[in-house]
Amino acid sequence: MEFIPVNEPLLDGNEKKYLNECIDTGWISSEGPFVKKLEQDMASYVGRNYAAAVCNGTVALDLAIEAMELSAGDEVIMPAFTIISCITGLIRRDIKPVLVDADPATWNMNVKQIEEKITSRTKAVMAVHIYGLPVDMDPVLKIAEKYGLMVIEDGAEAHGLNYRGKRCGSFGDISIMSFYPNKHVTTGEGGMVLTDSEKIYERSNSFRNLCHKPGYRFVHEELGFNYRMSNIQAAVGVAQLEKLEDHLERKRKMGEIYQELLKDNPRFQKPLKETPYAANVYWVFGLVLDKEDPMSAREAMEKLAKKGIGCRPFFYPMHLQPALRKIGMFEGERYPVAEWLYEKGFYIPSGLSLTEEQIMYIGEKVNEL
Ligand SMILES: *Cc1c(COP(=O)(O)O)cnc(C)c1O
C-alpha cells in the first residue's frame, strides 16, 4: 500500500468553478465578492451577527486579542494543552497566560480548574475545542458571567461541532476559526473572527486592514495589520462550506469505523464517542497509551511510519515550550495530564480523502503494535 498521509483535503465540490470565476472576473484580492459571501455564509451557519475573514487561524486569534482591547498585565486563563497560536498574541502584548490542565477523558481544558486561577487581573478565558469534542462551555460561561470576564472561543477544529445543540463558533464574546487544509472547511490557508458585537467586529475589521481611517485612506490613528483573506482563498472556502454536512458525515463514519476496529484493543485510550453535552465529530482520531506503557507516542508513530502510515504527535504543552521557558515563564509549573497526553498521545490518519480500505489497514497495523 502507498504511504497514507495523516491528512489530505477533499476538494470535490465547486472549488474549481469558483476559482475560475475569480480568474474570469479578475477579482483576486480581498475586495472580491467571495470574501463577503464566505463571511455571511459562515456567520449564518454558526449563528453569529458578524464575521471577518483573515489569512489564517493564528492571526484570527491575534486579531481577537487586539479587538478585545486587553492590556499589558491583564491575565487570560487558557489550556496548557493546545497549539502555540493561542499564546503568541498574549505574550507579544505582555498579557499573562494562566494555564489550566487538560481533562484526561476529553483532552479539553479542565473547567473545574478555572475558578481557582482567577485574580483581580483576570480579564478573559480562552476556550479551545480539541480534536473533535468541545470544551464544557456552560461552566465556562457561568464563571465568566460571575466574574465579569470575556470569553474567546477557539473553534479552529470545530466547524460543525455542536455543544448542547448549539454550534461551536457562536460561544462567548468572540470566536475564531481556521481553514487550514486539515480542518473541516479549508481555504488552503485562512481563518475567521466571529462575533455578535458590532464594536468588536468594527475593531477586527479595521485592524485586519491596516486601520485606515474611515474616509481618509492612508491616514492611520492606530497601527493595524494586513491579515486580509484573498478572494481566491474565499472561493475555495465557499465551495467547502457547501459540502460541510457531507464532510462531517464522512468524519463521523471514519470515527465509527476506527472505534469498531480498535474496540478490543486495551492498550490505547480512544476518543470518547460522546459526552453528556456533545457527540464527537472526530476532527482527528487520537490514541493515547497508558502512563505506565513502556512505549512512547514517538515510538508508536515511528513503527506506524514504517508500515506506511503518517501520524502526528499531540500538542506539546505550553508550560514546556522552550521559547517560553527561555523567557522565564511557567517555571516550576506542572500540568500532569497535558504532559501525559504529549508523551503518550498521537493521531492516526484522519483526512477527508481517506478510503475505507486505508482505514481497515490502519486499524490492523495499530492493533499489531
Ligand atoms: C489549526 C489551529 C489553529 C491555527 O490555525 P492556522 O490556520 O493553522 O494558523 C489555532 N487553534 C487551533 C486549536 C488549531 O487547531
Image (spheres, rainbow, N blue to C red):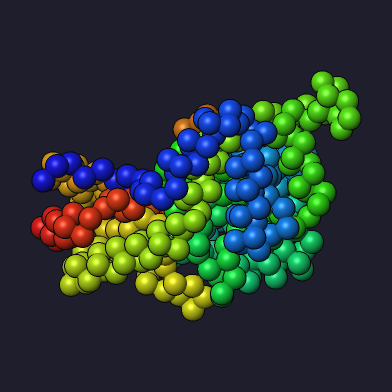
- Tell me if residue 185 comes above or below residue 107 in the rendering: above
Q: In this view of the protein, which residue sits in the foreground, 62 or 210?
A: 210
Could you say which quadrant of the image residue 366 lies in?
bottom left
Q: Is residue 331 left or right of residue 266?
A: right
Query: x and y percent of residue 278 in the render?
Result: 49, 72
Query: Is the C terminus in the top left, top right, bottom left or bottom right quadrant?
Result: bottom left
Is 144 located above or below residue 183 in the figure? below
Relative to 250, is 263 on the left or the right?
left
* Residue found farthest to the top: 218
Q: Residue sitting at 32 percent across and 44 percent down? A: 8
Image coords of residue 231 (percent x, y): 58, 36
At 68% across and 50% down in the image, what residue appears? 51
Q: Position of residue 347 (x, y in %)?
A: 31, 52
The x and y percentages for residue 36 are: 66, 45
Q: Toward which corner of the image does residue 131 lie, by quadrant?
A: bottom left
352 left or right of 186? left
